[in-house]
Image (tube, rainbow, N blue to C red):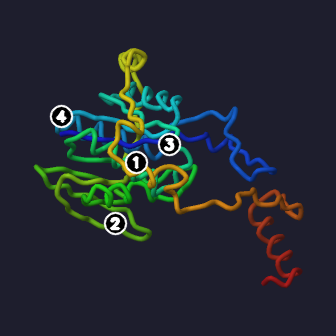
Amino acid sequence: MEIIVCIKQVPDSASVKIDPETNTLMRQGVPAIVNPFDMHALEAALQLKEIHGGTITVVTMGPPQATEALRECVALGADKGVLVSDRAFGGSDTLATSYTLASAVRKLGKYDLIICGMQAIDGDTAQVGPSMAEQLEIAQLTFVSKVEINGDTVTVQREQDECYEVVEAKLPLLMTVVRSINDPRFPNVKGIMKAKKAKFDEFGLADLDVDETRLGLKGSPTKVSKIFSPPKRSDTVVIKKDTAKEAVAELITRLKDAKIV
């Protein structure tokens, strides 16, 4: 089975700050990590490979330093990595990103399954995976929390707000996974040593069959006019009591005094 896993290197959300002058994320000096949802996508691929055999290729779009994210995935068990990187791709929104990644997947050739994390923690749109499937004209299964493959039939459990939905589809297809699908593994010494020596293919503008008007900023219909941190509230009241019962009683009294209840 040929599996492609799409990952993204993102700023560690615990360290992200917003520049008050430019209203943009301050990335300089902020540590980068593999998007957590994508780690679950890789683990799902590794488990499927253990059952069905095959090859896992990890693809990421980003600057040259994103190779470190690929290296981390190889340490965990991925076979190959591809960096999609070019200045022409800079500033891409989700539509331009999915178009570029889909073009990279076409260049890779044959595949059975593409796995993506449900969403990236720096954008939280959950749009790139489904949009890639549309670009590639293949089926998509989203919010997957369990997967089984029998021949060319994929059966998944989709996580909904109040229930689970069981769906079947035929390969090839793309699926996005939720955190509850698995617990990502840790790298072993053998994997770390392999990753240190790993070399990765790189696809730039000249390597892809693309329409340049659909790339980067000029190919991105979504424009961010402003981004800001919510104002800090100074009127917060902390209720400290010896027991929960006393704290609840105090809270109710305050709410009644404020005519909220």
Residue 88 disc label: 3
Separation of marks 2 and 1 at Cα, in angstroms: 32 Å
Q: Position of residue 165 (x, y in %)?
A: 30, 67
Marking on residue 235:
none
The residue type indicated by label 3 comes to Ala
Q: Which residue is mark 2?
A: 164
Q: Secondary structure at mark 2?
A: strand
From mark 4 to mark 3, how far is it between C-alphas?
Answer: 36 Å
Residue 187 vs 108, above or below: the answer is above
In the rendered image, the vertical position of residue 259 relative to residue 197, given as above or below: below
Q: Amino acid at mark 4?
A: Gly
Which residue sits at x=71%, y=42%? 26
Residue beneath disc 1: 100
Residue 53's disc is 4
**11 sits to left or right of 94:** right
Q: Which tag, 2 or 1, sits closer to the chain's start? A: 1
Rendered view: 188 above or below 112: above
Identify the mark nearer the N-term, 4 or 3. 4
Judged from the image, the secondary structure of the residue bearing numbered disc 4 is loop
- Quadrant containing the C terminus in the rendered view: bottom right
Image quadrant holding the N terminus, namely top left
Mark 4–mark 2 CB contact (< 8 Å):
no
Lower position in the chain sequence, tag 1 or tag 4: 4
Image quadrant assignment for residue 241? bottom right
Q: Are marks 2 and 1 in contact (CB under 8 Å)?
A: no
